[in-house]
Amino acid sequence: MTLKLIVAGVALALISMLCIAADSPHSNPTIPVAQNSVQADAMRVAGEKTFHANCGRCHAAPQKFPPRMMATIVRHMRVRATITDEDMRLVLFYMTQ
Amino acid sequence: MKSLLRNLARQSRRNFALSRPACVLLIASLLPAVSRAQTSSSDSPVPILSGSAGYFNFITAGQNQIDAQINPVLLLPLGDQWLVESRAEFEGAFQRPPGGGPYEGGVSKNLDYAQVDYIANPYFTVTLGRFLTPFGIFNERLYPIWIRSLQQDPLILPLSAESSDGMMLRGGFPLNPNANLSYAVYGSAISTVHNNLVSDRNVGGRVGFFLPGSRLEVGTSWQKLLQDARTNSFGLYFAWQPQRLPLNMHGEYARSNQGSGYWVDGAYRLSQVTYWQRVMRRLEFAARAEQFFSGEISSDEAEAIGLPGASTREGEFGLNYYLRDGVKAVASYGRQFSSDGNFNLWTVGITYRFLLPLGRVGLQ
């Protein structure tokens, strides 16, 4: 009985949170767009640094993949490695440019 | 012992039956959101079949074991905020019987995780289904054979549940420019411990701090059994990559009523060696030191869940050679010391990581 109450409470809380968060504007990292080549270079350097600091904690750098594959991989790694949104955007830029 | 395991299995089935209506309700409530608009931009994520395969020879105390395994991972992104992901494990382990004769063994199958993730916002992800238990870092992050630097499992790995069936909330965010925080909390109706045994309901969590400047992550984990002895498990971990060296260090400490212990390992890529660079930059030296202290359970119970039957020390070192992206040849030697006897552990093998898009990806 206690477990049922806990599960029901958590389910209600979850559904409430989903409703609140559903319209969040920044929930899916997209590949950032650089305004010019200088900014692109800076983002690439920052992305490489972020990649080595975050992804390199567990595994060696893989080859680069097409953007649609990287988008899936980044989403997977974001959940698995609890990497922040900002870091994910930089990694996505670095791995697709 | 068998009756204990039967009781565990029966209890777990009962727990699952109790929570099934709630799971159905949850999944039904989430379906409308899943079916909402899919993006169709050229950068939208594509489903992927990934995973790893490996072939190993493990020689433990003179006994040769041939081990072949394939661990497919399916990633299915839905819309902008959803991801369905799953990993299965198929492992064939074969060895000669003690009296000699042909190799014997079988293939074990395990569903490591099958989960639905909802990325609610940049700081918060909800996971439902079977997920890898976020206790320490080895189980969640370092377990795949293409990632781990030494193929033998740490002695303390079975101290926490391998997989949990339930719900998890997790995320990460920057505390300030010099520190990020990550967290995971979960509740589980059933947990699968190592050796595919099932365990009881539990709750737990993990919190970690990552300092990007020094590339250091430290964290702590906790797990509580919600029935019977209502025991607690506690863990600490670290991961460190010095800026100036191609060195990758990890370590964990765990404590529960089943025992306690620690492991520390390091992998050093020889990319800074100035001679034979074409070979040396692909070569990695790895080493691990670890210790396990017996807990309050009997040696039979400990061995049933994959723990050593007695307090144990182990040292291991190995060489990994990266043949090309995703392909790694491995070799290692270790020695285990315990009151049950000392013996050598040899490992030779090869691992392969694959990644296949299940749709059009266009040009890179």
Image (cartoon, rainbow, N blue to C red):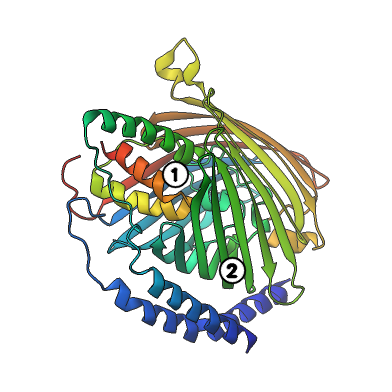
Disc 1, disc 2: CB below 8 Å?
A: no
Instruction: Tell me what residue is drawn at x 40 percent, y 72 percent.
Output: A20
Decide: is B206 above or below B130: above
Q: Nearer the viewer, mark 1 or mark 2?
A: 2
Q: Is B207 positioned to the left or the right of B122 in the image?
A: right
Which residue is labeled 1 in the image? Answer: B54
B301 or B119, nearer to the observer: B119
Q: State which quarter of the image contains the C terminus of chain B.
A: top left
**What is the quadrant of residue B353 in the picture?**
top left
Image coordinates of residue B341 in percent, x first then y, are 79, 43
Q: Is B336 positioned to the left or the right of B76 in the image?
A: right
How many residues crowd around disc 2 within 10 Å: few (fewer than 14), some, or many (20 or more)? Answer: many
Decide: is B361 above or below B364: below
Question: Which amino acid does the dot numbered 2 rest on?
Answer: Ser
B298 or A14, nearer to the observer: A14
Which of the numbered marks, if any, corresponds to residue B324? Answer: none
Which residue is labeled 2 in the image? Answer: B191
Decide: is A65 above or below B26: above
**What is the quadrant of residue A27 in the picture?**
bottom left
Question: Which amino acid does the dot numbered 1 rest on?
Answer: Gly
Image coordinates of residue B272 in percent, x first then y, are 49, 17
